[in-house]
Amino acid sequence: MIAVSLERLRARLEALAGFGGLPGGGVTRPCWSPRHEEARGWLLGELRAAGLEAWVDPAGNVFGATGVGALAADRPVVLTGSHIDTVPEGGILDGALGVVAGLECLETVRQAGAAHRLPLAVAAWSDEEGRYGSLFGSRAFTGRLDVERIPEMAAADGERLVDAMARAGFDARRAPEARAPAGAVAAYVELHIEQGPRLEEAGLPIGVVDSIVGVRRTRVVFTGQADHAGTTPMDRRRDGFLAAAEYALRARDLVVRRGGGRSVTNVGVVSVHPGVSNIVPARGELVHEMRSPDADVLAGLARECEALARRTARRRRVAVEVRPLSATAPALCAERVQRAVEAACVTVGLASTRLYSAAGHDAQNLAAIADAGMIFIPSKGGRSHRVDEMSDWEAIERGANVLLHTLLALAA
Ligand code: HGY
Ligand code: MN
Ligand code: MN
């Protein structure tokens, strides 16, 4: 039975981990950064060395394919892939696994001369982690970019997307040209770590993703009044930070209580202005993220949290501005792809279970233009988005072999 080479897969994962690798382990490789662009160059070299056609689109998405040098409406491909950008101080598998395993599958198919009617392709999507705007590359590919917003898209530290892309040699205004020709993708399947504890705790080797959560990010800015931190009587202070802090605590309780049990929320970005110890903070600013597999629940939570922000501002005699940053809708995975993954598990003798993805993924954009699905492998301790994110190498090999047989089935 055709099978991947774990040795080659491991060597490439470890090589990719070197671009932005951190001394104590883990990696920081933000999209468009010099080390990300070095990784892009390395990936293009590996795709070509594996005998694949390789190219980069105007949104910075990297592609490799068997026998075709571009996507076309009259010749649909079966596509796999993920992303090579990472969160700050992230792990070496989030994204990288799906790209390197996809390359490994295509190389294995080519070497084995395995028959497949449709061409196979692998993609590395730009800025999946959304440093400048969530799921940027796959949004461009699926025609879901908000073109007018491109000039204002920026990272939390203020760096603009246009500047970061220009530094890497890309013109951000051309990103919409990356839109795939209609019908160019027959099916998409992505291998990814679960990034959570469910598979490991269930003792199951493979997860077949049936739906992917929607993710909403909103900037909430509370503006009071700067004042002297020593001389201003406590009952006269209009503290923007305390309003933001109260909002963050109450929003968490609201989402837990009103989110139907599968909604989650996080505040990972906080800033205070002027931001010195002897001035009462005029401004407290945070990015509030919420996720749910249910679109209506997510929309309801967004409305309730906006009302909460206004109530909190009134109570604390400050102003508040609620500014939506991004929203990805929950996506359903195609039954056809889920069945192909389950059949591949039977072929390689593995149990599997269907589960929803509590993380966002490029597959939720691909689901808009093709039959899309995902394969999960267990994460050790459910750990992810941290330097000690890891999976067993046997689990990685199992996931890659399930991907291999799924691709062949979808391309038959
Ligand atoms: O944040 C996420 O859900 C994904 O890991 N980018
Ligand atoms: Mn990821
Ligand atoms: Mn991630």
Image (spheres, helix red, strand yellow):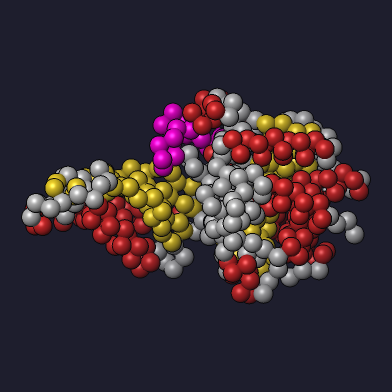
| Position of residue 93 measured from the top left corner of the image (x, y, whole percent) | 65, 54
Question: Is residue 318 visible to the viewer in this orientation of the structure?
Answer: no
| Position of residue 51 measured from the top left corner of the image (x, y, whole percent) | 84, 37
Q: Nearer the viewer, residue 258 or 2?
A: 2
Question: Per the image, is 119 magenta?
Answer: no
| Position of residue 119 measured from the top left corner of the image (x, y, whole percent) | 80, 40
Which residue is located at x 53 percent, y 46 percent? 129
| Position of residue 404 measured from the top left corner of the image (x, y, whole percent) | 79, 53
Question: Per the image, is 148 magenta?
Answer: yes
Q: Nearer the viewer, residue 174 or 36?
A: 36
List the single residue furthest toward the front.
Answer: 23
Q: Nearer the viewer, residue 42 or 54?
A: 42
Which residue is located at x 88 percent, y 56 percent? 2
Q: Nearer the viewer, residue 299 or 325?
A: 325
Asked which quadrant contains residue 79, the reply is top right
Q: Is residue 18 above or below residue 315?
A: above
Q: Is residue 323 above or below residue 356?
A: above
Question: Is residue 388 visible to the viewer in this orientation of the structure?
Answer: yes
Start and end of the magenta stretch?
140-161
Which residue is located at x 58 percent, y 26 percent? 170
Apparent side of residue 376 relative to residue 172 in the rendered image (left or right)? right
